[in-house]
Image (spheres, helix red, strand yellow):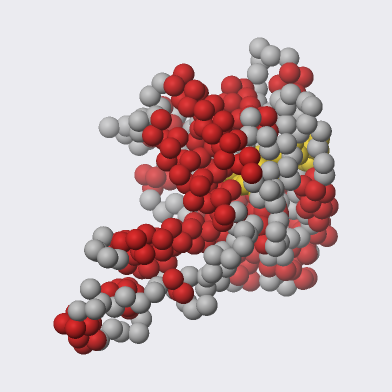
Amino acid sequence: MATRPDVTTLLDSIDVQPNDLFARYLRDGLRGADLGPLLPPAGPPTAGVPTAPSVAVDLDCLFRVVMFLEALPGVGAKAGHLERRVRRQIALTAAHNALQAVIPNPLVGREREYAALLEYRTSVLATARDWVPSFILVGPGGVGKSALVSKFVSDQRRKPGAPPLIYLDFDRATLIDATPLDLTFEFTRQLGLAESALDQMLAEFRERSRSMLGGQENLNIDIGAGTSSAALRDLASLLSGWPRRTAAVTIVLDTFEEVAIRGVTPVRDVLQWVVELRNTVQLQQIHLVVCGRAVIPDAPHLPPDEVAAMFNVQYEWPLEDLVTDRAVELLTVLGVEPGLARRFPPLFGGNPLVLKLIHRFVTTNDPAEVEQLLEDGEKARRNAPSGEVGLRFVYQRILNRIKTPRVRALAYPGVVLRRVTPELILKVLVRTCPVPST
């Protein structure tokens, strides 16, 4: 197309505004220009962190242009290669941004826990046990579990030549009811991002595995289980020549309480899937990090030791509120005046989420309202532990954000829910408020 004089003349006559990146990419692509330099070079295998491009690029606009060019005669093959690179860069950027959104800057009061994670990641683990060894990180909501592991994951991925680190957050909609096959797909997707040399091969593996189900992944439990086993055997064959197969591969299971609350069977399924990665795929040095409010499920019909044995715990680290000095340090780092910062933790405790909300309250309210908050905290502290006062503050802040009376009526005192479904509203919440159910 670019060789036709009439097309070239037409493209040259188009006045593209400087901020219209879509039009610029499209014009250059129709001219036959190579859009590849807009992306960072593929380079050697990385740990899965996006490399900054040489110029500012809008990946969404570039992707739409590439998809359009791919359908044009004589351009498709070249654009198809570029499409894979753009998709990879979008995935890397999305994963990176998701971690950055919750990473504390700086990390305050969690140095020992962070060092313990690093030590565990580099340790050599025994492989003779039935279950894969794990590092358990537990603690109440808002204490900073996800912030800690997100910083750990991000830092490790930034290290040149770092072993792959797979991060599975069960608070994500795509993983809420994930089957072992779903977990395998996500594992290989992230492994491909971490190891660019494996990316295309693993993408083809996922397509091949999906085709075995005929597009009906939940058709039958037995069929799904058989496909999952076959997929792992296929994956073992694909990775047989991977140079880092015997090195440490870390898998982080975050927000694991979402699995544990569903009972012992889903927990066993996830942990057994990790065992199969070790045994079938022959990833002998899998380092498992399990993070959540509570990770061991209730199983009244099983001996507690049998349930705990599935985790094969090597380290268990309860994450607690920051001690007073570190809580004051966090408030100060966030921007609260040091003298004022020292007044909050004795009343509201050292939960990092509470402290961040206090910082936001201080910066968005006048001094009189801040003093009133401290006075209210003093009164509440006489009758309740500081942690309870802090949580009360959090809940009150949440309630104050609800401006519609009919919606506010759904708020049930003392209950905070991570995920509200229509069924939960109809069967539980609606009974406690005057909102009609029809």
What percent of the width, then of the height, locates residue 263? 59, 23
**Residue at 39% from the left image edge and 45% from the top image edge:** 407
Q: Nearer the viewer, residue 401 or 153?
A: 153
What percent of the width, then of the height, locates residue 28? 32, 78
What percent of the width, then of the height, locates residue 47? 64, 57
**Residue at 61% from the left image edge and 30% from the top image edge:** 273
Left or right, 118 with respect to 213, comes to right
Question: From the image, which quarter does the C terminus lie in?
Answer: top left
Q: Looking at the image, is 415 positioned above or below residue 40?
A: above
Q: Looking at the image, is 162 positioned above or below residue 211?
A: below
Q: How many marks?
A: 0
What percent of the width, then of the height, locates residue 271? 64, 29
Q: Residue placed farthest to the top in the image?
A: 301
Residue 111 occupies quadrant:
bottom right
Q: Nearer the viewer, residue 145 or 66?
A: 66
Q: Residue placed farthest to the left in the image?
A: 6
Q: Is residue 217 visible?
A: no
Question: From the image, which quarter does the N terminus lie in?
Answer: bottom left
**Residue at 60% from the left image edge and 35% from the top image edge:** 236
Left or right, 225 with respect to 267, comes to left
Q: Nearer the viewer, residue 347 or 229?
A: 229
**Residue at 26% from the left image edge and 60% from the top image edge:** 71
Q: Looking at the image, is 7 positioned above or below residue 171?
A: below
Residue 170 occupies quadrant:
top right
Q: Is residue 428 visible?
A: yes
